[in-house]
Amino acid sequence: MGVVERTWEWLTTTAHWSGTDGVWHRLGEHLFLTVVCLLISCAIALPVAVLLGHVGKGGALAVNISNVGRAVPTFAVLVLLLLSPLGSHGSWPTVIALVLFAIPPLLTNAYVGMREVDRDMVEAARGMGMTGTQIIARVELPLAFPLILTGVRSAAVQVVATTTLAALPGGGGLGRIITAGFRLTDTAQVVAGALLVAVLALLVEGAFVLLQRLLDPMRGHPATVRA
Amino acid sequence: MADDNCLISNDWVCGEYVRTRGQELTDATLQHIGITLASVAIGLLVAFPLALLARRWRAVAGPVLGMTTILYTIPSLAMFSLLVPVFGLSAAVVVTGLVLYSLTILVRNILTGLASVPQEAREAARGMGYGPLRLLFAVELPLAVPALMAGLRIATVSTVSLTTVGAIIGYGGLGNLIYEGMRSYFKAQVLTASVLCVVLAVTADLALLLVQRLLTPWARPKRRPKAAPKVRKTEKAVA
């Protein structure tokens, strides 16, 4: 029997979907970690990026932080946190690693989005007597919105990927199905787990693409900003 | 004496570890460099014709860019796992996965680079009797170097970092040491391998930056503004 058939068989066996090691439970863990960590990172990164972008300072920080995020291996950070004193505190090492790696795309995209807003428009708004807060809320944020959401989308996909990796040092989530498959040298289970993870990542990406289209405040207006 | 004890007391920083496991560290680093080099080189070889095809025919551009974006979305652990039935437990799994990731960045940046070539430069070359091939290699490519190198740097740094995940099948370079160290709670091994990994990424980045400067002496004063906005397009997935 080929790998494809055996994978199909694994996926269609109801026993694999129930229980603490089952797909549904692992999926629940995966989604829970993803949502919580995404919310925490947005709460940290977005206000900072919007403020920095508004005053036009800290551009080097916003760009460099994404370079740093790229150079540091996620796997290494996960393991380092596990071996640190934090490691004995349940899923905290995973949560911290997830938040750390979600921040760079959020920060960079939101900052670039704010900076790319046409300066003439900001000047015009100021000339109309708008205060700084009003400019942020009514001019800059709506115009920067597509890029901010792009950042959230990247961060979400990143968090899904990192959560998968967190299974290596023993975290929860769908990655556990893959690592358990490797331990059992059960290729069918490895492939089944990988498929589930890939589908989840693509669904998250797709959902955000859709959300981006639906929520864009400039929807229906001619694109004037993205020159 | 103090050095001897750091292995027993499981310290994070341990000179004795580096001294006694020098060979192991060197082997892992060499495997890491090997996997990275192979992946980026193959990635470049595949991305180049893909970008040329995408530029020539609009109908190809959509599917190529869409496909590479989809591949980029798949988490690394899943990507490697999906390739295991194809290649077995070999380095080819890791290299193929990393090549697929690098394509997204490389194809996009090569396209951006070629699109940034001024039309006048093309016209002038044609007027001087340049054929399409000579136009590409003597005029367009050199002018596309800044965008191409920006992409190559991002792809290389991501590849160095993602190679560690290859540890799941035993071909992760320094990742293998991190994986082993994780299982045995060997702090010095995990920290040393992690630091070496970052050093490797930074060194590769700086080396490529140097190459870029040597290749484009004319672009030196204006390099910054070109490189900065590139970040957002390719931001993502180091996991």
Image: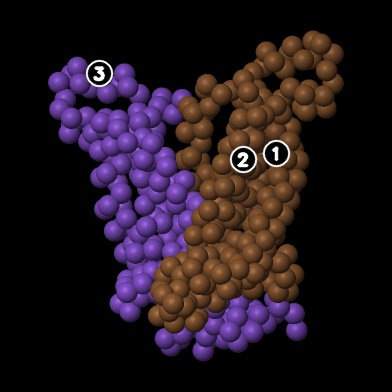
Tell me residue A50's x, y (percent).
28, 39
Give neighbour class at mark 1: few <14, some 14-19, many 20+ (Cα, 10 Å). many
State whether residue B158 appears in this view. no
Q: Please, what is the three-letter code of the amino acid marked with disc 1?
A: Ala
Work out whether residue A94 or residue B24 is closer to the camera in this orientation and state it: B24
**Label for residue A124?**
3
- The residue pinned by badge 1 equals B51
- Rendered colour, chain A: purple
- Rendered colour, chain B: brown
Q: CA distance from mark 3 to mark 2?
A: 43 Å
- The residue pinned by badge 2 equals B208
User: Which residue is depicted at the point 67% across and 63% down?
Assistant: B31
Residue A188 lies in quadrant: bottom right
Residue B3 lies in quadrant: bottom left
Name the chain under label 3. A
Work out whether residue B107 or residue B139 is closer to the camera in this orientation and state it: B139
